[in-house]
Structures are given as C-alpha cells and as structure tokens.
Amino acid sequence: MLPTNDVVQQQDFEPEEEIGVTNDANNTVTTNSKTTNGLGTFDNTQNSKLTFRQVRTVLISSTGFFMDAYDIFVINLAVPMLGYVYYSHNNNKVPSNIQGAIKGITNVGNLIGQLLFGILGDSIGRHRIYGLELLVIIIATIASAMSGAAARGIGTLGFLGFWRLLLGIGIGGDYPMSATVSSEWSSAGRRGQMVALTFSMQGWGQFFGALVDIILLAIFKYAIEADQMNIDYVWRILLAMGVLPAVCTIYYRFVLPESPRFAKNVLRDDAKMERGIKYMRMKNDNSLGQQNEKENAVAVVEAPDQEDINKLDKQKQTIDKRHHLRDFGQYFSKWKHLKVLLGTSLSWFLLDIAFYGLSLNQSVVLSAIGFAPTNAPPWETLWKQAIGNLIITLLGSIPGYYFTVFLVDKMGRRTIQYMGFIIETILFTIIAAAYYPLKEHALPAFVVLFVLVQFFFQFGANTTTFIIPAEVFPTRFRATAHGISAAAGKAGAILAAFAFNVLINVGGTNAFLPQTLGIFAAIQFLGIFTTMLIPEPKGKGLDYFEDDETEWRKNTTPEKV
C-alpha cells in the first residue's frame, strides 16, 4: 500500500483559480496565475499578508546580503591603507594594475559562484545548498584578514587576492540562492517588496563598512600618526568584522525547509510542499492542518488503484531522468525564452560597469575632486575618504533602496528600471561635461551629484536587475537563470574594476576621469533598450511564469526526457 502522502498528491489545498489583472494599454484582462497547484497562498496577488516565518526568511537572506555588501565594498576603503603599508616607496599608492586586480578578483569569484550555485540550486534543490555559500564566506573572510607573506615568492597582497577570490565564490553563490529563496517564499502581493528588502541590505553593508572604518581610524589615530605602519592593524580588523553577520545567520539557512514551489513543480513531492507551507503558515493558519487531517482520513479508507500507481511511477521516472543543463539549453533555445534571459543579463552587465566602476573607486574619485586630498597626512586622507563614503551611502544609497522597497509593487519593476537608466544617463552626462567647473568652484554640488547618482542606482536598475530574474523564469530554471544574469553583471563589474584605474590615468593622474564618466553615461543609455526585452512581473504570481513542459519538450523523443 502506498504512503498516505502519495495517495493524496492530486489534492490541492485551495481550489484552482485564475486571477485577472487589467492591462492598461488595451484595457484587457490577463491572468496572473495559471493554476494554484496547492500554492495559491503564494500566487494570490491580493494576498499582501506576511507571516512570521516569511519575515524571518527575508531576515535570513538579507543578513547574508548585508555581509556580502560589506565584504565586497570594504575593499574600496582598504586598498588606500594597503598603499601606506606596502607601497610607501611608491608615494603611498598601490600601482593601478595591482589595485585593479585586488578590487576585481572578488568579482571574478562572484561570477564563478553565481554560475555554480545557481546550477546547484536548481539541480539539487534550495534546501540542500542554502548555507554552504555562507560557510565558504566565513572561512575566506577570516583568512583574508590574516593574509601574510611567504618567506619567498608570494607576498601579502598575493595571498589576499587568493582568499578574496574564494570569498567572491561564496558571495556569488548568495546572489541566486538568496534571491530565489526570498522570491519563492513570498506571497505575490509582497514579492517585489520582500526581494527588494533582501537586496536593500547591500546599502547597510556599505554604510557599516564605512562606519567601522571611521571607528577603527578613531581608535588608532595616535598610533597611525606616530607610525603609518600601524594602519596594518586597521585594514585587517576592518576585513575581519565582515564575518559576524555570517556567523549569526548560517544555522537558520541550514534548517530552512525546501521551497514549497520547488518541491511541487520540480521534485513533484507533495509531502515536502506540505511541510514548506506548514512552516510558512505556522501560528497564522490552522486550516491547512484540518485539511490534511481530512485527506489522511480519506487516504486510509481509499486504496490506490493501478492508475495511481502508474502515475506515481511516471513522476518518479521524470525526476530520476531530469538532466538540468540539457533541459535548460532546450528551454532557452526558443527565442521567446532566450530574449528574457538576454534582457536580464545585458541590463545587469551594463548597470554594473558604471555601478562598480564608481562604487569600488569612490575613494579615488573623492581624492580626485579634492574632498580627500592624497597629499595630506595618512590619517587625515583615510578619515576623509571614510567620511565621504559614509555620506554618499547614507544620503544616496540607503534612501534609494527603500524608495524601491515601498514603490516596487506599485510602480512596477520595468518602470523603475527605465527611470534609473534614464536618470543615470543624464547625471553622468552632467558630471562629465561640468567636471572641472564643479571641481574648482562648486565642490559641494559635486558631492550632491554623486549622492544622486547612488540614489538612482538603488531606486533604479541596481535593485531591479536583482529582483526581476528571481521572478520571470520557471521554478526549474530560476536559480540558474538568476545566476547567469548576475554573472553577466559581474562580468561588467570585472571590466570596470580592472579598467577603471588604468583608464582614468590615461594622459596623467586622473586626467581621463571626466571622459570615463561620460562613457558611463553612454553605457547607461544602452540599458534603456535591453530593458525592453523583459516582461513586467508586477501583479503576477510566480505560477504565471511556470513553463509548459509539454510545449518545449514537444520535439524531444521519449527516451531523452
């Protein structure tokens, strides 16, 4: 006799339904959900309620992202310190090629981790993978802070680069996993807000990176003024502090159940789906337990017939023969699917060239415009760079994130992304064209413009490029597609990290900085066109984007399924 849970696989928790949304362009109604399949509590776009477990899941994901951002962007503050400690013979400045490598190597790791964990998250499952990326981050963060030189050969910066490459792999894995987990555990009415909340912790990671730097510089002020080599303590402690949020979060990631959506749509496991829904609705809805009691009672009385057995055997064969990468290639061989992946990937690529080009080099830009002059004493220069980063993050980045959090489910993802790319194009054009007048006569206006740039990065494409790939792909490919999109972004970040410090010094120190900012304007302009390839997820349950497996497999022979 079959187990009880298997007998009742076809019983949904809620009646199947279609929920319509009005298309303002032609005043027609389109469905935002195909069928609930037992997941109606998630796909109902009228449901904006949050359970305690949903809130906790967002906190688990977002705390990890806080640490990701801290670790990625704190190198912007640490590299100038490395110049004072290891390159005092080079005017206290790390050479441009080495500086680019140290800043860019983490993004190389990001790219590897995004692809690797994205594929694993879809092929193995969210539950079995989520938490491993955090373990990698903890190990690499501690090792980065303890980097030292070999007696011969590799120096401190070489080992630092290796550990930050490993750190990047862990951070990269967090992108598709946290985005997918946040999206799949959210109700449709709050999904954009919950994924945006997860990503918004990037701003707080940047903020606390600058804040910790300021605190450490204040503590070590007299030691640094006595001997600048004492800066060695500051950058090591600064990097090590990034491990604290990871330690606080890792346990809760390992015990998070399998996503109900992945369990139902990919594993075909109703028992795991039930456990996930129970977990999410605990202390909020007892109807599920009552429904299960009724189903169990029926299952005891009703014996399965041969049709039930054959259906279950067929489901097991489908799972056993599932080849993720082959299926992924087959699904995206169709243009209507591929164009969406191109839209999310190219938009993220173009965005990150400018975003990381500026964010990883804010200290350089602040020094170039005279806010933190490098000819001042070491402590004063580092202090002003930290203060400048803190101001830009607090006044620009963080408010931008929360404008998106509160407006994304009202305005829509594409609207915010269009707006971000358009305004960034305008702002970069103004800064590039008026660079020297602003620098010489209106330094406060210059800082205000950089604050606005960061604001519209976050209340714009930097947030939406993270949200959209977590929504517009089928469950079986969601983590992989998000990983590919994020990896495309990191390819742009790598390009920016390695090229920025070389490009701005063409013709002399910072001589080509205005033209570089002008290039950023042109790149953001291209993002307007890549956004056209992306559908609008606003007002749609994730079930709306589920794949019709029979449609994309119709040319596949039975032996290959």
Image (cartoon, helix red, strand yellow):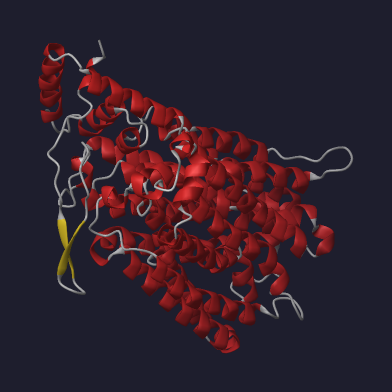
Residue 443 percent coordinates (x, y): 53, 81
Horizontal side of residue 66 vs 413, given as left or right: right
Residue 86 percent coordinates (x, y): 79, 53
> Residue 396 falls in which quadrant of the image?
bottom left
Q: Nearer the viewer, residue 296 or 155?
A: 296
Residue 383 visible in image: no
Residue at screen point 71% across, 43% down: 162
Residue at screen point 38% across, 57% down: 468
> Residue 182 falls in which quadrant of the image?
top left
Residue at screen point 75% across, 48% down: 157
- Is 120 placed above or below 393 here? above
Horizontal side of residue 133 vs 300, given as left or right: right
Residue 76 visible in image: yes
For the C terminus, the quadrant is top left
For the N terminus, the quadrant is top left
Horizontal side of residue 527 vs 549, given as left or right: right
